[in-house]
Image: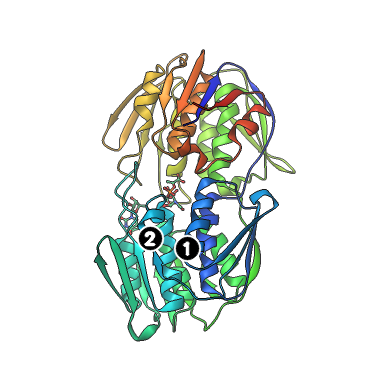
Amino acid sequence: MDSILVKGGGSLKGQIPIAGAKNACLALMPATLLSEEPLTLTNAPRLSDIRTMTQLLQSLGAEVTSLQDGKVLAMSCHGAINTRAEYDIVRKMRASNLVLGPLLAREGHAQVSLPGGCAIGARPMDIHTDGLSQMGAEIELKDGYLLAKAKGGRLKGAVIDFPFASVGATENIVMAASLAKGTTVINNAAREPEIVDLVECLRAMGAQIEGEGTSTISVQGVDRLGGTTHRVVTDRIELGTYMLAPAICGGQVELLGGRINLLAAFCDKLDAAGVTVTETANGLSVARANGDIRAVDVTTEPFPGFPTDLQAQMMALLCTAKGTSVLEEKIFENRFMHAPELIRMGADIEVHGGTATVKGVDRLKGAPVMATDLRASVSLILAGLAAEGETKVSRVYHLDRGYEHVVRKLSAVGAQIERIAE
Ligand SMILES: CC(=O)N[C@H]1[C@@H](OP(=O)(O)OP(=O)(O)OC[C@H]2O[C@@H](n3ccc(=O)[nH]c3=O)[C@H](O)[C@@H]2O)O[C@H](CO)[C@@H](O)[C@@H]1O
Ligand SMILES: C=C(OP(=O)(O)O)C(=O)O
């Protein structure tokens, strides 16, 4: 299993290109199941999660070809479809549940393994299944699989009130509703940029959808969808992660492809902490002048609030801020697994339930630490870049789910970082 070795201390300067969004691409890929015509995605990120989704779609009968070193995914689903998504693949990644809506919409039935929880929380699927049931699906759980069947062979439109603005449930229902009979309205829909990206692609395929980016999405079902070529939106979480690198280490880095409107709440917190973010012709420039980072309080919320997927990385910054910061995690019940690892590096953090209190220390110290999940792993790398001495982050397979070429990107701006095989 590989580890990442980081030597802390130096400031950073240069440019980092930001990839297409993992979480957009993972929702866009299953959309190929909705059409017999080709769907091509450009600006795809090169990640293990994308390879897992490729494997899952291929197991269902889709053709998925990776071109241009993985940056382009050419997909097509014109033959017979296997409607059973097996546990062996689904268990690797929760986003596998995004094949449920498309399979049900196209074939009228599906068997999809329940993905189970993960390190950050239990992550049930009740909002997905309740919504599909309202659209006329009969769903039962058998042997760990959701067995779903559309009454009369085709889903029908419904007005669905989500109890929480779930990202995945919004994506599943929007895809299912695109081929359903009649109109579906989702109230309290998620508003994330990845949903806007999915809807733009579905619309180009012929879907009739309104309201993406707002809390009410309306979908008028059509009989068939065509193909298209779609560019995956910029990964705002990779963007925010690399914005924190110069914030923690000092220096100035330009994030190519970055836009403030993808991360406004996060940029406000950086500003309050004393980090300068400016828009450039090609992206965003982030600079930390000499001087302390100020403590700030952070509460994670659905978009447009502060993203839970940047909470761990923000905590790494606040470990050396002047004063005490309070971080409240409101999305996932167990998303502070990085705190004990940061404490091993000398951070002063107390966690009580969904609240972490971080008292800034002068300096973190390098240590061997273990990644527990995707964003935790990169927060330890960021902490290591600022720490005195050497930090070894093990279990890097978590990192490979969501960050392509992390060593290459950070080395290019002057970080001392290498990947070692053990
Ligand atoms: C592949 C992908 O896009 N992953 C993102 C997606 O995950 P995901 O789509 O799984 O996140 P959701 O928005 O669905 O989950 C948010 C909260 O709702 C709960 N919930 C969700 C569905 C459900 O049926 N019942 C239920 O109780 C979850 O347990 C969690 O506490 O959005 C999360 C919240 O921004 C991000 O952290 C993930 O990176
Ligand atoms: C939680 C994440 O991903 P997933 O929903 O795939 O677990 C993430 O990207 O931070």
Amino acid carrying label 2: it is Glu
Of marks 1 and 2, which one's residue comes earlier in the chain?
A: 1
Label 2 crowd bin: few (<14), some (14–19), many (20+), radius 10 Å: some
Circle 2 — which element? loop
Amino acid carrying label 1: it is Ser
As drawn, is 48 to the left or to the right of 143? right
Circle 1 — which element? helix
Callout 1 touching callout 2 (CB < 8 Å): yes
As drawn, is 376 to the left or to the right of 4? left
- Cα gap from disc 1 to disc 2, whole angstroms: 9 Å
Q: Is residue 187 above or below residue 138?
A: above
Label 1 crowd bin: few (<14), some (14–19), many (20+), radius 10 Å: some
The residue depicted at 42 percent of the width and 32 percent of the height is 371
The residue depicted at 43 percent of the width and 55 percent of the height is 95
Mark number displayed over residue 268: none
As drawn, is 103 to the left or to the right of 160? right
Q: Position of residue 133 (x, y in %)?
A: 31, 73
Residue 257: which quarter of the image?
A: top right
Residue topped by disc 1: 59
User: How many circles with numbers are drawn on the protein?
Assistant: 2
Residue topped by disc 2: 86
The residue depicted at 44 percent of the width and 64 percent of the height is 99
